[in-house]
Image (cartoon, rainbow, N blue to C red):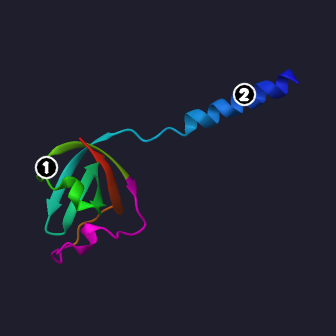
Amino acid sequence: MKKLFLILLTSLGLMLFSCKKKALENMTVVRDCTGTYLRIDRKDYRVCNLEKLTTYNDGVLVTAKFHKLKECNGSGMNQIVCMMYHQHEGWIEVTEVK
């Protein structure tokens, strides 16, 4: 019985620590004629909800939190862009910016 309790307690502890929320990360705002992106670790993520970054200029370092999207239905989708290609890792929704 003690072994079962110890195994259960250990499993519960591991599950609680593995479900941490993602912390705020330092990123760079990248703007060009193709859209608005956040760059982290040399990877660009296209921003779907542009209203979160309207006060930040190109090249500014920000601390932000985001989650990836399968598709964008926000203001980033309606942005008029040029026909140039900008490689990115997909759409994101910014949830917090500092």
Name the kind of residue labelled 1 in the image.
Gly
Residue most toward the right?
1
Q: Residue at x 88, y 24 (%)?
A: 1
- Looking at the image, which is closer to me, 92 or 75? 75
Name the kind of residue labelled 2 in the image.
Leu
Kindly identify which residue carries mark 1: 59
Q: Is residue 10 visible?
A: yes
User: Which type of secondary structure does the marked residue at label 1 adopt?
Assistant: loop
Residue most toward the left?
57
Q: Which residues are magenta?
A: 67-84
Count neighbours of disc 2 (C-alpha within 10 A) and say few if under 14, some if 14 to 19, many if 20 or more. Answer: few
* Magenta span: chief secondary structure: loop
Tell me where residue 76 appears, x and y as whole percent: 25, 67
Q: Residue at x 18, y 78 (%)?
A: 83
Q: Quadrant of residue 4?
A: top right
Quadrant in the picture for the C terminus: top left
